[in-house]
């Protein structure tokens, strides 16, 4: 009775096919994971509050949603000076968002709870 065993070349082609499929799968996974937006907790905050200071303020697009991350143990606010049009409370250890002004410019802001905390939001 004949024994049906795949030839060596058939096994090689199968192994190559498996490697190609795995490589394509890894490429797709890498592309899809790198295209996901970061959460505020992972470092994408536009404004960061730490040690009673606004430690990070990235430029934002006009009308964009601005994310504020409070890395401290106290509640703070991000309150525009004058008529900047934004005022948000950020609980201790949490994030909050507000809408950036629609016009490009430099908008000074402060914490209304701790008035010594001041910074500038740049809107492009």
Image: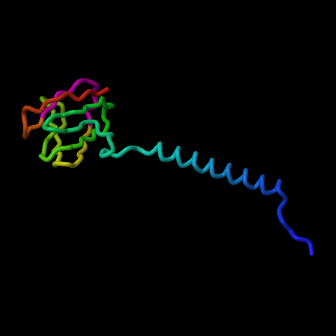
Q: Residue at horizontal 13%, vertical 37%?
A: 52
Please tell me how many numbered marks the rendered image carries: 0
Left or right relative to 20: residue 102: left
Query: On the picture, is 1 further left or further right than 55?
Result: right
Q: From the viewer's perspective, is residue 1 above or below residue 96?
A: below
Classify 65 as above or below 91. above
| Residue 14 location (% of width, % of height) | 75, 55
**Nearer to me, 59 or 86:** 59
Nearer to me, 118 or 107 = 118
Q: Quadrant of residue 122?
A: top left
Q: Identify which residue, 43 or 104, lies in the foreground.
A: 43
Q: Quadrant of the C terminus?
A: top left
Is residue 109 covered in magenta?
yes
Task: Identify the residue at horizontal 31%, vertical 44% (top origin).
Answer: 40
Q: Quadrant of the N terminus?
A: bottom right
- x, y percent for residue 28: 57, 47
Question: Where residue 98 sits in the image (x, y, percent)?
Answer: 24, 41
Name, please, the residue furthest toward the top. Answer: 105
- Residue 121 lies in the magenta-colored region: no
Residue 37 spot, x, y in % from top left? 40, 44
Residue at 88%, 70% (x, y): give it: 3
Range drawn in magenta: 100-110
The residue sitting at the bottom extreme is 1
Q: How is the image coloured?
A: rainbow
61 on left or right of 121? right
The residue that appears at 14% across and 41% down in the rendered structure is: 77
Residue lying at the far right in this picture: please name it.
1
- For residue 105, which quarter of the picture? top left
């Amino acid at each position: 009775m004949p024994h049906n065993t795949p030839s060596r070349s058939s096994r090689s082609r199968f192994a190559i096919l498996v490697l190609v499929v795995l490589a394509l799968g890894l490429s797709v996974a890498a592309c899809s994971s790198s295209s996901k937006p970061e959460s505020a907790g992972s470092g994408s905050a536009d404004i960061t509050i730490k040690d009673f200071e606004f430690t990070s303020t990235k430029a934002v697009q006009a009308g964009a949603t601005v994310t504020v991350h409070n890395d401290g143990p106290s509640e703070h606010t991000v309150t525009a000076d004058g008529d900047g049009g934004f005022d948000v409370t950020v609980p201790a250890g949490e994030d909050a968002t507000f809408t950036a002004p629609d016009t490009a410019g430099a908008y000074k802001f402060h914490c209304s709870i701790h008035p010594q905390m001041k910074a500038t939001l740049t809107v492009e």
